[in-house]
Image: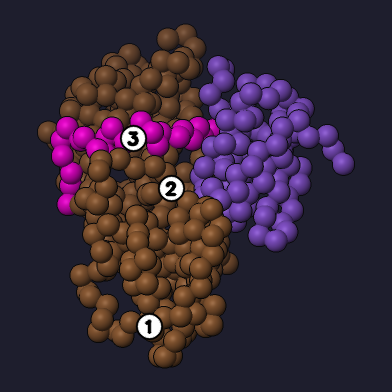
Chain colours: A brown, B purple
């Protein structure tokens, strides 16, 4: 190749992709970063929502890594396309609703499409053999290469010496001898390499911020699908699963109850889409009702809402019920006692 | 007040969506044009300037009032926005 080779690197914001990118930059390759937003990479969202977290310094780790490396970063919205991965993963789910192997194949495929569109030569990931139970095993790494279509244009600099030489190595665009043989779950080699490169600040080792690996989040997602006619979702659905206390007192509706002011403010943004409740006589949460409800259901929801407000021990609490088309109804209700809230209602 | 060529309302969106929307808007703009982004996620105060720095654009101003953040970006350099052919 007479001109400088060009690679795109999948930047998660974690240490491994940062190291892999730097390793290839050190070899004189022009590297740009790519980061895919699935809707489940919501690390910063609860910080943005909850009032107590709003003063904490926030950063998007992928952007931060790109800036540290001095490379461009292309952030790609793949929310719609990702549904196909999550809803029908060919290789199944991990411990929770995480379709890690399909997810990796999908992202490498998107990166492969990107390099074809933009005249780049190969793809870099920060994968380390044996580090992750699904997507980073010796037997699954070739699956990602094959199913993504990237084949030997996919270079994993941190464990390349455990794998057959890729095209960039065979063509001499990168020197295989300067690549690595990291293996397993130990982070020591990465820490040592970070020190060698002078990286003193980096996101939690192993990176990633996918809520699909979270048990509580996955249970809410499964509950949502179970009570809908189809296993589908919109971005708002998956955002709301991250916010508030979720209770399902009846199969046909659930309540999303804000836990603090920041969440209440965030949920207010959805008041045109859901019936919402708020306490008038006492301080209390903002509550959204998701589902079709009748008068009895609203009475029950109001009593539950009262339970989670400052009037929980009062004889009567005044709860305002507001429909998406701005019809207001005022209810006087007795808050449910603590033992009247069935543990099974909590999602 | 500087002329604004494009307005982008990202209120109620959480990062990185405001960044992605700004990135996609800038990809359709010319060097020297100005984009004004309105957002409610305080994350944009870090993320949009960071994205601009690494992609070669200039944050001209950033104001915050009543939980809304208004950022004005001057598009700099042709070919720098994401997803344009290099």
**Residue topped by disc 1:** A335
Q: Nearer the viewer, mark 1 or mark 2?
A: 1
Measured as percent of width and height from the top left, residue A237 is found at 38, 49
In the image, farthest residue toward the right: B1
Q: Write the start and end of the magenta stretch as one range.
A: A70-95
* Apparent side of residue A197 relative to residue A186 in the rendered image (left or right): right
Q: Is residue B23 visible?
A: yes
Is A77 contained in the magenta span? yes
Q: Residues within 10 Å of mark 1 (few under 14, many from 20)?
A: many
Mark 3 to mark 1 CA distance (whole Å): 42 Å
Q: Nearer the viewer, residue A207 or A265?
A: A265
Indicate which label's residue lies in the foreground, 3 or 1.
1
Vertical arrangement, residue B7 with respect to residue A218, above or below: above
Residue at numbered disc 2: A236
Question: Which residue shows up at 46% across the image and 33% down it?
Answer: A76
Subunit under mark 2: A
Task: Tell me, yes or no, if residue A136 can be seen here.
Answer: no
Q: Which residue is mark 3?
A: A82
Verify whether residue A6 appears in magenta: no
Quadrant, the N terminus of chain A: top left
Relative depth, front residue between B22 and A337: A337
Mark 3 or mark 1: name the one nearer the start of the chain: 3
SS for callout 2: helix
**Badges 3 and 1: C-beta atoms under 8 Å apart?**
no
């Amino acid at each position: 190749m007479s001109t400088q080779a060009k690679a795109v690197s999948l930047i998660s914001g974690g240490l491994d992709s940062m190291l892999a990118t730097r390793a290839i930059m050190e070899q004189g390759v022009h590297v740009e970063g790519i980061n895919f937003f699935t809707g489940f990479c919501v690390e910063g969202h609860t910080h943005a929502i909850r009032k107590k977290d709003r003063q904490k310094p926030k950063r998007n780790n992928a952007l931060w890594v790109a800036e540290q490396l001095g490379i461009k970063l292309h952030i790609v919205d793949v929310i719609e396309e990702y549904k196909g991965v999550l809803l029908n993963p060919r290789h199944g789910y991990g411990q929770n609703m995480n379709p890690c192997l399909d997810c990796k194949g999908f992202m490498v495929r998107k990166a492969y499409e990107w390099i074809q569109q933009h005249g780049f030569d190969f793809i870099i990931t920060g994968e380390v053999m044996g580090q992750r139970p699904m997507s980073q095993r010796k037997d699954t790494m070739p699956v990602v290469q094959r199913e993504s279509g990237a084949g030997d244009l996919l270079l994993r600099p941190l464990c390349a010496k455990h794998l057959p030489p890729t095209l960039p190595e065979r063509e001499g665009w990168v020197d295989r001898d300067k690549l690595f043989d990291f293996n397993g779950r130990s982070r020591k080699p990465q820490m040592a390499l970070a020190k060698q490169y002078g990286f003193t600040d980096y996101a939690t080792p192993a990176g990633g911020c996918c809520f699909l690996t979270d048990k509580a989040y996955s249970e809410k997602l499964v509950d949502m699908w179970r009570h809908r006619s189809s296993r589908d979702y919109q971005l708002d659905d998956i955002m709301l699963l991250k916010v508030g206390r979720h209770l399902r007192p009846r199969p046909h509706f659930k309540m999303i109850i804000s836990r603090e002011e920041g969440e209440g403010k965030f949920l207010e943004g959805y008041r045109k889409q859901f019936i919402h409740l708020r306490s008038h006589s006492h301080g209390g949460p903002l509550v959204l009702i998701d589902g079709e409800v009748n008068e009895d259901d609203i009475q029950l929801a109001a009593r539950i809402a009262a339970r989670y407000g400052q009037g929980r021990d009062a004889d009567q609490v005044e709860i305002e019920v507001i429909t998406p088309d701005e019809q207001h109804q005022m209810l006087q209700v007795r808050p449910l006692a603590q033992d009247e809230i069935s543990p099974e209602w909590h999602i | 007040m500087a002329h604004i060529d494009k307005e982008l309302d990202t209120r109620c969106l959480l990062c990185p969506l405001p960044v992605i929307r700004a990135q996609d808007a800038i990809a359709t703009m010319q060097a020297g044009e100005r984009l004004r982004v309105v957002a409610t996620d305080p994350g944009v105060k870090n993320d949009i300037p960071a994205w601009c720095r690494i992609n070669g654009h200039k944050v001209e101003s950033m104001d915050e009032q009543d939980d809304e953040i208004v950022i004005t970006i001057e598009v700099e350099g042709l070919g720098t926005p994401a997803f344009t052919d290099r």
